[in-house]
């Protein structure tokens, strides 16, 4: 499967992130706008779900550097949302000599209290 055509169900996403609970999958699938789930491959979504589930007080961010492909390096930064964070990260990478060819940001919706 290349991409989901809609927001997947927890059952559809589970094979790509088997370590997550049903509840964690439900939270991940409710967190972002529909376009987030349709622009990434199921494998990428599974990786994003696992990394985001790992964030917490002891792990406030995760930096992921993907293997170079055709001279390109992929960098994903998972963290809690702070104003201006994306532009600061892009600026730091550019200042270190990286040629940033594209970038995207996905900010989750605020979590609702259960109950």
Image (cartoon, rainbow, N blue to C red):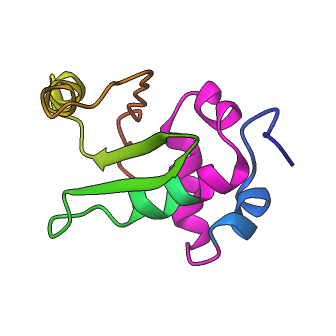
Residue 82 against residue 61 in the figure, above or below: above
Q: In this image, 73 relative to 23: left or right? A: left
Q: What is the magenta range? A: 18-46
Residue 38 forms part of the magenta stretch: yes
Which quadrant of the figure has residue 56? bottom left
Q: Nearer the viewer, residue 19 or 69?
A: 69
Could you tell me residue 97's position as x and y percent? 20, 30
Locate the C terminus by quadrant: bottom left
Residue lying at the far bottom in this picture: please name it. 19
Q: Is residue 115 visible?
A: no
Which quadrant of the figure has residue 86? top left
Could you tell me residue 46's position as x and y percent? 61, 58
Q: Is residue 34 visible?
A: yes
Q: In this image, 86 relative to 99: left or right? A: left
Q: Nearer the viewer, residue 99 or 7?
A: 99
Residue 101 forms part of the magenta stretch: no
Could you tell me residue 2's position as x and y percent? 82, 43
Residue located 12% across and 27% down the image: 95
Could you tell me residue 110's position as x and y percent? 35, 35
Residue 65 against residue 3 in the figure, above or below: below
């Amino acid at each position: 499967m290349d991409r989901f055509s809609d927001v997947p169900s927890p059952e559809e996403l589970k094979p790509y992130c088997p370590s997550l609970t049903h509840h964690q999958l439900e939270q991940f699938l409710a967190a972002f706008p529909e376009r987030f789930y349709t622009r990434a491959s199921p494998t990428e979504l599974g990786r994003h779900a696992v990394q985001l589930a790992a964030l917490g007080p002891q792990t406030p961010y995760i930096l992921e550097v993907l293997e170079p492909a055709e001279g390109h390096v992929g960098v994903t930064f998972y963290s809690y949302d702070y104003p201006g964070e994306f532009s600061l990260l892009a600026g730091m990478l550019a200042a270190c000599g990286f040629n940033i060819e594209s970038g995207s940001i996905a900010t989750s919706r605020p979590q609702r209290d259960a109950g």
